[in-house]
Image (tube, rainbow, N blue to C red):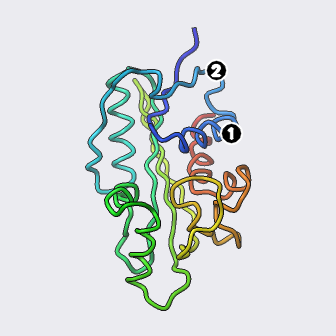
Amino acid sequence: MKNSLLLGSGNAGKIKEIKFYLKYFNLFKNFKIIDLSSFTSLGEPIENGSTFEENSIIKSTFFFHKTNYLTLSDDSGFTVEGMENFPGIKTARVAKEMGGEQQVVNYIFKKNPNKHKIGASFHCCLSLIGQKVNVVVTGKVEGFIISHKTGNEGFGYDPYFIPSSSKKTFAEMGFKEKMILSHRFEAFKILSTTQK
């Protein structure tokens, strides 16, 4: 019987990307990959950490203890230059509270008048927690936030973020192009060096 790896996220966009990276980096190929949809109700972890790392570990540890499966979780978001790590670890929460990503972007540009783009960075922390496993890695991509939605691919803030290595937003890129340039790629690249 195969060992199982639980992807500790309920975000369909993240699950799709994580599965891409597992295949791309040839990780856990002898494992059965399962996600939270395999369970009726595990509850939700209380993400009260003060960093991406802490929240990622909270998620992985929570789902590992609930299921006893080796668990891989991700906590990610972006920070804006000159705004004291806003929105940071509250990236998804702030969007929910303000009524969507466009409202958050509007708020950022209201605080930074006369700018068409603002320096920002996307962060991804992956944690792998199991019986005798405790691995935490972080990836980061620098770039810019723009004021208006551009592109139709991806999810979340993808239409507003242009990585420094491109002239396109993540949402204007094809799936694989975005995957290779993203913060999650950087984190998985490091994770892959720990799993040889």
**Which mark sits nearer the N-terminus, 1 or 2?**
1
Query: Quick check: 58 above or below 100?
Result: above
Q: Is residue 117 above or below residue 23?
A: below
Query: In the image, is residue 68 above or below residue 170?
Result: above
State the image coordinates of residue 57 (x, y, percent, origin top left): 37, 42
The image quarter containing residue 160 is bottom right
* Picture coordinates of residue 112, whole percent (x, y): 42, 85
CB within 8 Å, label 1 to label 2: no
Which quarter of the picture shows residue 16?
Answer: top right
Q: Give amino acid for label 2.
A: Asn
The residue under label 1 is 25
Q: Secondary structure at mark 2?
A: loop
Q: Pointer 2: what residue?
A: 30
Q: How many callouts does the rendering have?
A: 2
Q: Which residue does the image show at 53% across and 44% down from the upper left?
A: 14
Q: Residues within 10 Å of mark 2 (few under 14, many from 20)?
A: few
* Image position, residue 5 (x, y; %): 52, 25
The Cα–Cα distance between marks 1 and 2, rounded to whole angstroms, is 13 Å
The percent position of residue 181, horizontal first and vertical second, equals: 67, 58
Residue 112: mark in rendering:
none
